[in-house]
Amino acid sequence: DADVTQTPRNRITKTGKRIMLECSQTKGHDRMYWYRQDPGLGLRLIYYSFDVKDINKGEISDGYSVSRQAQAKFSLSLESAIPNQTALYFCATSDRTSGAVRDTQYFGPGTRLTVL
Amino acid sequence: AQSVTQLGSHVSVSEGALVLLRCNYSSSVPPYLFWYVQYPNQGLQLLLKYTSAATLVKGINGFEAEFKKSETSFHLTKPSAHMSDAAEYFCAVSAGGGSNYKLTFGKGTLLTVNP
């Protein structure tokens, strides 16, 4: 079984709808991240969480919110989806220990979201 | 602050030819550097990482990268391309031992391997 799973894998929705993307991990990592990937732009950080009570905005958090329900679960919500939020969304995890172990992130398979 | 520049959004090679994907970084502290690979319809997979030990880093699938501080580069190479290497490759930097744990990614390089 995969260490980092994301649901759904694909989603098509309409402008104005509320959407939730879910991420679960079995790696036992404390830190979790949400990124979006757009062609030609690489990955951009939306939100990150160091533990259940520590949630932080990334570089492109506007229009998104997150919830860390447990150490293993981190959800991303689009409160009112708009077409320019059409993208590939990735969840990632990393360990809390120091150095390169801390900075090494492990990615889920992604959710392809289309907002019409 | 840290940043990554990947030179060439698309690289095309013939099967059996040398693969060279370029990455230059900027960091105010000694960095950690990473290469990730993304196969079609999949997530990112760690290929290799530099963590201030050996400057020549070997990764999976025959790839390696050399950290050159004087050139602020971390180019990815493979002596002989295989069809299965066709994917998108991302270089990323973090601030090493600093408190900034975040990864900053380059925009990616799509590698095409021609038969």
Image (spheres, grey):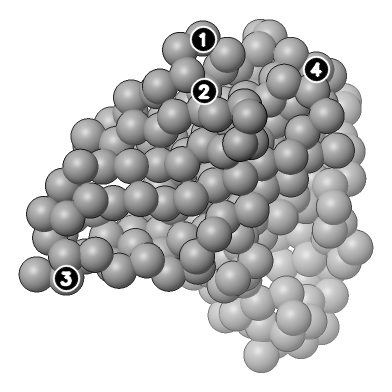
Q: Is residue A112 visible?
A: yes
Q: Which residue is mark 2?
A: B50
Question: Label 2 sits on what residue type?
Answer: Tyr
Q: Dot 1 falls on which chain?
A: B
**Displayed quadrant of residue A115:** bottom right
> What is the secondary structure assignment of the residue under circle 1?
loop
Q: Is residue A42 above or below residue A86?
A: above
Quarter holding the C terminus of chain A?
A: bottom right
Q: Is residue A31 visible?
A: no
Distance (Cα) linking label 3 and label 2: 30 Å
Do circles 3 and 1 both sit on a common chain? yes
Distance (Cα) linking label 4 and label 1: 16 Å
Q: In the rendered structure, are the residues bearing label 2 and label 1 in contact, judged by CB atoms less than 8 Å apart? A: yes
Q: Dot 3 falls on which chain?
A: B
Residue B53 badge: 1
Q: Residues within 10 Å of mark 4 (few under 14, many from 20)?
A: some
